[in-house]
Image (tube, coloured by chain):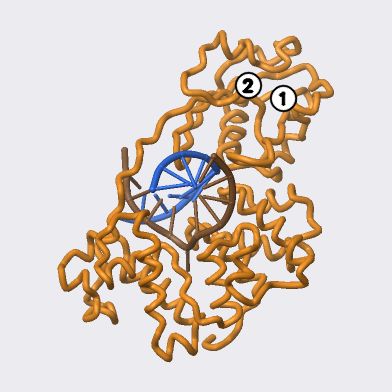
Chain colours: A orange, B blue, C brown
DNA sequence: AAATCGGGGCT
DNA sequence: AGCCCAGATTT
């Protein structure tokens, strides 16, 4: 509602989830997250693993780690800072999110500059310099857009209006200029170059990497899993064991060398030892990953060493803090193994 | 300034 | 098969 101030906790969670993520993808995660962690205190006292479970499949897992750290910091502070600088000093909150929380939750007259606003700025002011180099310039010009009294009086609505304009009319391709309220003041439209802006520098090509992961199941349907290191790619999420991904493909002989528990593989399934039961292709931002999923039934999962992982009942695997990649690997592996059994 | 960091939906 | 998305952090 106009002029209403939103709950800063809710605004914070939604803005973090919406970073580089579509509204459609966020909505179910948002509701589930608030149900599981209703307030700052609930989030701060929860174990990180539980937060990663709620984040499972949403991507960019440093957001979940920083969210948890930030909740602890907010408890220390006694609540949210109400200004942009204070907000931006918190973990996981950069220039955009600080401005968004300040405007939407606290009514501070600032303009959160996201991809939508950058695009609007590039067109209104006909900025031809390519992204991402032009970021600073686009942001500097965008913050002049709210100088009118309506924007000053209703910062939250103005921010939302910019987002809506970028999402419905001033879209990346084929913008609907004829419906745009700023049609006459848009410099790019005057020049007829609105559909070409903002310009972007070509992206580097995406290399391919190769991985192997093992689906090891014992007679009681227990699966061996482990936790990835707490930092870096998919940091803190649960995965099937396997060697580090590399730039070259894996031969069957190499796989046999690195397979865990080779001495305990059972022939109960009549599966040739170390059979590929499925292949998974997964595209990350900066490389494409091709994974061979190998499966075997082992006589019993031994008490694994810390770095080897831990056993989990098959029916509970779905509730682990899996990445989407590992969800695919588990499903592919289980289905492939079933094919051999049946 | 460039690289890292996910995943899905749309064209 | 690219391109995009309510970006932040590290190098």
Q: Could you say which is closer to the camera, residue A186 or residue A144? A: A144
Q: What element carries label 1?
A: strand
Asked whether residue A342 is in view, the answer is no
* Marked residue chain, label 2: A
Tell me what residue is drawn at x 34 percent, y 65 percent. A119
Quadrant of the drawing holding the N terminus of chain A: bottom right
Residue occupied by mark 2: A295
Tell me what residue is drawn at x 27 percent, y 64 percent. A127
Label 1 packing within 10 angstroms: few (<14), some (14-19), many (20+): many
Tell me what residue is drawn at x 55 percent, y 26 percent. A245
Q: In this view, does A120 lie above or below A179?
A: above
Q: What element carries label 2?
A: strand
Q: Could you say which is closer to the camera, residue A14 or residue A84? A: A84
Quadrant of the drawing holding the C terminus of chain A: top right
Q: Which of marks 1 and 2 is nearer the N terminus?
A: 1
Q: In which quarter of the image is residue A307?
A: top right
Label 2 packing within 10 angstroms: few (<14), some (14-19), many (20+): many
Q: Quadrant of residue A306?
A: top right
Tell me what residue is drawn at x 56 percent, y 83 percent. A107
Q: Is residue A142 left or right of residue A216?
A: left
């Amino acid at each position: 509602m106009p002029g209403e101030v939103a709950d800063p906790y809710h605004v914070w969670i939604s803005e973090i989830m919406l970073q580089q993520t579509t509204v459609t993808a966020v909505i179910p995660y948002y509701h589930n997250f608030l149900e599981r962690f209703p307030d700052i205190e609930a989030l701060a006292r929860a174990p990180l693993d539980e937060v990663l479970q709620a984040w499972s499949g949403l991507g960019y897992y440093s957001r979940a780690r920083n969210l948890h750290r930030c909740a602890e910091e907010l408890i220390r502070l006694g609540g949210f800072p109400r200004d942009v600088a204070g907000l931006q000093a918190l973990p996981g909150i950069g220039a955009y999110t600080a401005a968004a929380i300040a405007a939407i939750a606290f009514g501070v007259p600032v303009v959160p500059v996201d991809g939508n606003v950058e695009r609007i700025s590039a067109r209104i002011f006909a900025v031809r310099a390519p992204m991402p180099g032009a970021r600073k310039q686009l942001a500097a010009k965008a913050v002049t857009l709210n100088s009118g009294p309506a924007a000053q009086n209703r910062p939250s609505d103005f921010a939302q209006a910019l987002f809506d304009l970028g999402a419905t009319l001033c879209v990346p391709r084929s913008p609907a200029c004829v419906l745009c309220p700023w049609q006459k003041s848009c410099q790019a439209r005057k020049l007829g170059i609105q559909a070409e802006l903002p310009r972007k520098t070509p992206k580097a090509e995406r290399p391919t990497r190769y991985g192997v992961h093992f689906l090891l199941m014992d007679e009681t349907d227990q699966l061996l899993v482990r936790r990835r290191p707490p930092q870096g790619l998919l940091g803190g999420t649960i995965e099937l064991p396997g060697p580090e991904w590399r730039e070259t493909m894996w031969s069957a002989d190499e796989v046999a060398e690195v397979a865990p528990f080779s001495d305990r593989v059972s022939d109960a399934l009549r599966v040739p030892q170390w059979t590929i039961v499925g292949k998974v292709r997964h595209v990350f931002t900066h490389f494409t990953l091709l994974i061979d999923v190998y499966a075997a039934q082992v006589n019993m999962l031994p008490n694994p060493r810390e770095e080897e992982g831990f056993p989990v009942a098959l029916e509970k695997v779905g509730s682990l803090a899996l990445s989407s990649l590992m969800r695919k690997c588990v499903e592919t592996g289980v289905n492939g193994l079933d094919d051999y059994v049946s």
